[in-house]
Amino acid sequence: MKFITIIIFIVSFITAVEAKQKDRAYFAGGCFWCMEEAFEKLSGVEDVISGYSGGTTENPTYREVTYGKTGHFEVVEIVYDKEIISFKELLNTFWKNIDPFDPYGQFCDKGYSYRSVAFYQNNKEKKLIENSVKELEKEFNKKIVTYIRSFEKFYKAEVYHQDFYVKKFQRYLEYKTACRREEILNNIWNL
């Protein structure tokens, strides 16, 4: 009888842990500091973590990603509650915070690691991304150059990058203003 009780307890524990696991989404939109700020404001988003994804180098550093040939992009991992916010809503926020027509990077950050990427983890997310690209291309009558990639692995960026826009707000604001990020976004999306 004790054995059955232990088994029931273990199954209940595993079920409870799985129920508490949150969904995650991954987007690259140039500087991950700016993407953190955009997503952390959303209801249902519990955490946004700066990091790297899309490449082949394990545990890359910022310097390796921006100056090397790791194949990684600056990416944010968004931890969210799908009961409050959907992947589609996150995707819409992603589009409104990037220039999907820039093949060289984002705003003043140029280079491969600053390209925009929408990562998918399953066919449903892939279809949502592909459909949104088609809609945007029709709306703007322009080709979207944002990559659509299958998500494989995420590497958390160095501690000093996490919540940079909060910890070093003045420096962050100077950077964001110098890059004309808000101005360019307003021109594209009529915000």
Image: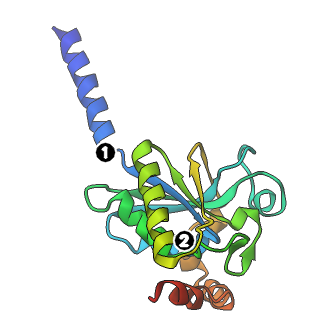
| Mark carried by residue 136 | none
Colour scheme of the picture: rainbow
Q: Which residue is mark 1?
A: 20
Is residue 108 visible in the rendered structure shown here?
yes
- In the rendered image, residue 113, in percent from the top left (x then y), is placed at 72, 62
Residue at 44% x, 63% y is 132
Instruction: Label 1: state its secondary structure.
Output: helix
For marks 1 and 2, the one nearer the N-term is 1
Specify whether 39 is left or right of 13.
right
Mark 1, residues whose alpha carbon is within 10 Å: few (<14), some, or many (≥20)?
Answer: few
- In the rendered image, residue 59, in percent from the top left (x then y), is placed at 71, 47
Residue 120, compared with residue 42, is above or below; it is above
Is residue 39 visible in the rendered structure shown here?
no
Where's the N terminus, which quadrant?
A: top left
Instruction: Label 2: state its secondary structure.
Output: helix
- In the rendered image, residue 57, in percent from the top left (x then y), is placed at 75, 45
Residue at 73% x, 44% y is 56
Amino acid type of the residue that numbered disc 2 sits on in the rendered structure: Met
Amino acid type of the residue that numbered disc 1 sits on in the rendered structure: Lys
Q: Nearer the viewer, residue 10 or 127?
A: 127
Disc 1 and disc 2: Cα gap in Å?
25 Å
Residue at 60% x, 88% y is 173
- In the rendered image, residue 175, in percent from the top left (x then y), is placed at 67, 85
| Mark carried by residue 35 | 2
Q: Nearer the viewer, residue 8 or 41?
A: 41
Specify whether 157 is left or right of 121.
right
Residue at 80% x, 62% y is 63
